Image (cartoon, helix red, strand yellow):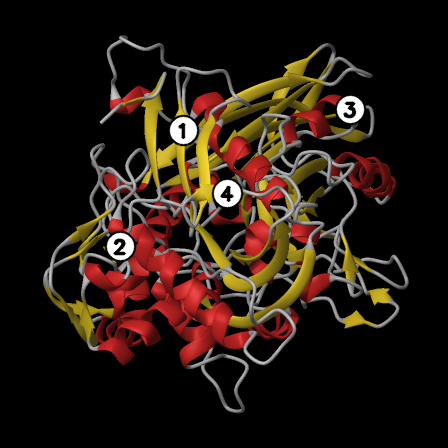
Amino acid sequence: MPLNRRKFLKKSAVTGAGVALAGAAAAPAAEAAEVTKGPRPAKRYSLTVMGTTDLHGNVFNWDYFKDAEYTDAKGNAKGLARVATLVEQVRAEKGRCNTLLIDAGDTIQGTPLTYYYAKVDPITAKGGPVHPMAQAMNAIGYDAVALGNHEFNYGIETLRKFEEQCDFPLLGANALDAKTLKPAFPPYFMKTFRVKGAPPVKVAVLGLTNPGIAIWDKAYVQGRMTFPGLEEQAAKWVPKLRSMGADVVVVSAHSGSSGTSSYGDQLPYIENSAALVAQQVPGIDAILVGHAHTEIAELKVANEQTGKTVVLSEPLCYAQRLSLFDIELVFSKGRWTVESVAASVRDSKTVADDPEITKLLQDEHDVVVEYVNQVVGTATATLTTVDARYKDAPIIDLITKVQEDVARAALAGTEYAELPVISQASPFSRTSQIPAGNVTIRDLSSLYVYDNTLVAKLMTGAQVKAYLEYSAEYFVQTAAGAAVDVEKLTNAGGRPDYNYDYVSGLSYDIDIAQAAGSRIKNLTYNGAALDDAQKFVFAVNNYRANGGGAFPHVASAQELWSESTEIRTRIAEWVTAKGVLDPKEFASVDWKLTRDGTPVF
């Protein structure tokens, strides 16, 4: 069946004063089933809302870092080409005129494919290319997409260009212009479904994004945009949508359902608040959940005011799943009412790539494959992250060494040039490897999978110690003499690997037999106990510098310097300049795990 390329609406125009809201285009008429309900027959209508989230630039079932088909231990498959096949199956089953396709954000960042068309051959260049994600999503026929936090990673100009290239609106009811406090993007999308023999059904999709953007992409949005809480803005917009005649209200929220935040008390808003929106804001029928990279086929939440059940679903990231909300409506007493909502997911591994999407984007894919396979140097030994989360691994030392060198060069000739430079890095991946021999861009990209940039902050010895204590909370407390299972040693309290930091330039032990907050032992600088008053230049990625992970002191510390070049690019430049990647030039044992003073390994 051919893909649906028809535009369902004319995209809203964004103005300095706010936004002109999208009008609705009518879908073809569908039959309304009659049922006997009391003395009079009632009309029924079945609607299916399909949803994806956290696509992160995955068009094909391809691992650019391994230069091979994507595989994992569970046999998953990913990519919009697979989703396209699933979408067409659902449209065939349900009737194309009875379906809606939406997404919950994080679209244009995450793979070398998206990086290439943001930085190497940017869509913002005069006469530049059309973004691969815009091409694919236009071809599949998305109706609306909520903004994710990673949409802002390349700056407002890139995001606006992507928006211009899309045949669907990018929604963000809580993405406000900082001066006018009016929506900087369309808050909602509304579509009318014509029903034969009954009044039309109006469906509204409210888009909400993550308040953490104000922290994570501060450099791009500060003074330009502000991001209030999801609950607050949903409470504002849902009644408006109902007053405009919406029979069904679906929220597409780039926010997880756990009710937790990674940024501590830096913002008065909850990062993962989708379930709270369902609980606190009446008038919502379903919520497509994003951001958390988890799979929730169906979650039912009772609204505390009405008692009504709101159904949530989060499809697995990278287009590995497609969520379906099957919504049953009944027309009674002059209006359509939602009678039931049921959610489920469909699995991308059960279908093949859609040949039309493959044909559409094969050239872009091939260009990026060639790009990431460029050789930039040679390695004298194999470097791996396999055990980097619990042992000081040379491959992470490479990151900290590059950051130290870049920050030191940037501050040369300034009043801070004589201060010692220390550096942080996280074991992002458990599978990254730089093999002995030729080193390619994809090898280095797999080591640093995020598009973070470098910042230099001014920190004291006392602040650095507090920083290390917070980082050490990552380890599960393990008594001396107890068996050590490395699979259960880390991620205490659910903390992800990217929120555990090495710090170079110091020497210290992490005593995991001790309670969190009292684990850093034998902390020294240049062989002497660390002086609380000692000042350091702290080379840190922008996510951490802006408060990501809620590490103490760093967000409020004085900023000495920052840049827009990605750390990944700096690593490639460093290796290219050296020609040879030799651990002797960067590897050092700065820390180790102990229990009551005895090394764990």
Q: Nearer the viewer, mark 1 or mark 4?
A: 1
Instruction: Provide the secondary structure element on which disc 2 rests.
Output: loop
Q: Check disc 1 and give the amino acid type.
A: Ile
Horizontally, is 358 left or right of 93 in the view? left
Q: Residue 32: tell me if it is visible.
A: yes
Quarter of the picture holding the C terminus: top left
**What's the CA distance linking mark 4 and mark 2?**
45 Å
Residue 579: give x, y in percent of width and height: 20, 77
Q: Residues within 10 Å of mark 4 (few under 14, many from 20)?
A: many
Q: Position of residue 473 (x, y in %)?
A: 49, 27
- Gap between marks 2 and 3, in whole Å? 52 Å
- The residue that disc 1 covers is 510
Mark positioned earlier in the residue sequence (4 or 2): 4
Cβ atoms under marks 1 and 3 closer than 8 Å: no
For marks 1 and 4, give the CA distance: 44 Å
Could you tell me how far apart the alpha carbons at marks 1 and 2 are, in whole angstroms? Answer: 19 Å
Image quadrant containing the N terminus: bottom left
The residue labelled by disc 4 is: 51
* Tags 3 and 4 touching, CB below 8 Å: no
Amino acid type, mark 2? Ala
For marks 1 and 3 on the same chain, the one whose residue lies earlier in the sequence: 3
Q: Circle 2 sits on which residue?
A: 587
The type of residue carrying mark 3 is Gln
The secondary element bearing badge 4 is classed as strand
